[in-house]
Image (spheres, rainbow, N blue to C red):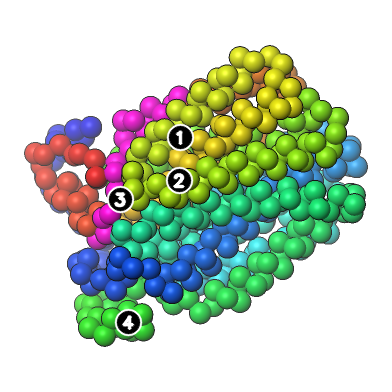
Amino acid sequence: MRMLASTPLPLLKRLSNSISPGRTIVSSDAFSVLDSTELTTFHRKVTILSAAGMFLDGFDITVIAVALPTVTKQWHLSTFMAGALSAAAVVGMFVGALVFGRLTDRLGRKKMYLVNLIGFVFFALVAALAQDAWQLLVCRFLLGLALGADYTISTSLLAEYAPAQRRGSLMCRLGATWFVGAATTYAFALALLPLGDAMWRVMLVLGAVFALIVLWMRRGIPESPRWLAVQGRGEEANAVLTGLGDATARLPGPAAPQHDSPWCTLLTMPLLRYTFFCCGFWFMYTLSYYGITLYTPTILKQVTTSTTGTYTGSLIIALVGVAGAFTGVALVDRVGRRPLLIVGFIGMFVALTVLALWQNPGLTGLVVLLGAAVLFANSGPGIVNLVYPSEVFPTAVRATANGLGTAVSRIGAIIGTLWLPTLIKSWGLHHVLWLFVGASVIGLAIAATLAPETKGRTLEQLSAEISGRARSDSAAPESVG
């Protein structure tokens, strides 16, 4: 893409400045204690507590897949209302990601890191007490606000603390833990089968209890020194870095405050390319993945009448997805982000195409092929979707960019969840699968043409490279890698 070559120089200078508007530019050496090649106890603590939020995301989102067959029968739900219940939390995530992403860039990572978990606890408990479909729908939407917020907060905070050489694998652990949470949902469903119709309510309560524990443990995590530095709060950033073991931390003092528009920054070159890339591939991934994941029991029920067989098959698919995610974790800092993304979309395309062409796969065939699709999805786009937005966007707009990417991806998830029951009823499962095949093809095209390689670079190096492109009036942009 040679978009910058024809852009006027004055505009390029203004856009270059807008990458860190009104903020202090800090060299990568200032954060050497964070970018150590050796993982410290603190690095592990931040990773675990951030991943705990993603575990809750996966668990709470997937609970509706377990609850849906029960509440559909108990409350005599229409096909549309069943889809609306599945999509309610996803719609909430759309709103939560946009709102809290911007607030996280304005108010700080730590404040929002704690506030959003309060929403996890409260709304999960209220949802567990719902007495009809509309009450549950509203509660799921409100819970979704907290879920969407955590995507932006946890990813931004961890990216700003993670060492450059290990950042990919640490951040991919967030995505992997999401899939562990989803798989745990089905494991609990099997264990709690004797509870009957009350099973899903108990599962929501358990999720709230876990969120309360994580909330208590997160209180000791300090504010991101990178965010403090960009805000011109150098002394506070120095104090955090000193506490982490850097006795020589000397960041600049206060910077002159300046009003800025992060949305304009994201939608103007040179960041526009990365905005389109991150939103595009993430949208295509969630369109396919959520449609499959949130309706796995419903899809399997078409080929078996056994409740145990349905949940066992769903658990197997979820566990295969976990294996795929941890495969990606092991490879992301070795082979890079770009190869994982491209191979993941290729694998999704092949598995879904075979499934769409196979008219009567049976329970085993359905589990194998859906498992293969999820395996490739989770080893590529399902984990790097949390890495790329945190790497290619600068600190001043990182959480906002994460929020925008999450929100756009939720549109794909909404389509995949809200309309899927109606589409399956009208078109049949095999015709609907071609929609997912098409999404994987488009996702592959976006990845192949726009995906940069970012492994091993500090966040300051990546921001400097993008800023350098904005200042150049002659050189065509290349990949970040």
Q: Nearer the viewer, mark 2 or mark 4?
A: 2
User: In x, y percent, where is residue 401?
Assistant: 40, 51
Based on the displayed image, in which of its 4 quarters is residue 447 positioned?
Answer: top left
Q: In the shown orientation, is residue 254 left or right of residue 93?
A: left
Q: Nearer the viewer, residue 371 or 233?
A: 371
Three-letter code for the amino acid on which mark 4 is drawn: Gly
Q: Amino acid at mark 1?
A: Gly
Are the two marked residues, 3 and 2, in contact with CB atoms closer than 8 angstroms? no
Q: In the rendered image, which residue does mark 4 sit on? A: 245
Give, as a three-letter code, the residue at label 2: Gly
In the displayed structure, would residue 333 be above or below residue 417? below
Residue 300 horizontal/vertical position (percent): 75, 30
Closer to the camera, 307 or 8? Answer: 307
**Residue occupying the point 38% across, 27% down:** 445
Could you tell me which residue is drawn at 53 percent across and 67 percent down?
A: 49
Question: Do callouts 3 and 4 mark residues in contact (Cβ within 8 Å)?
Answer: no
Instruction: Measure the alpha-carbon separation of dots 2 and 4.
Output: 31 Å
Give the residue at mark 3: 455
For label 3, the SS is loop
Q: For the residues marked 3 and 1, what is the alpha-carbon distance in whole angstroms?
A: 18 Å
Which numbered disc covers residue 328?
Answer: 2
Q: CA distance from mark 3 to mark 4?
A: 25 Å
Q: Which residues are magenta?
A: 441-460
Q: What residue is disc 1 on?
A: 344
The C terminus is located in which quarter? top left
Residue type indicated by callout 3: Lys
Between discs 3 and 2, the one toward the N terminus: 2
**Neighbour class for label 1 at 10 Å: few (<14), some, many (≥20)?**
many
Residue 293 in percent (x, y) is at 65, 38
Judge whether residue 101 can be spotted in this image.
Answer: no
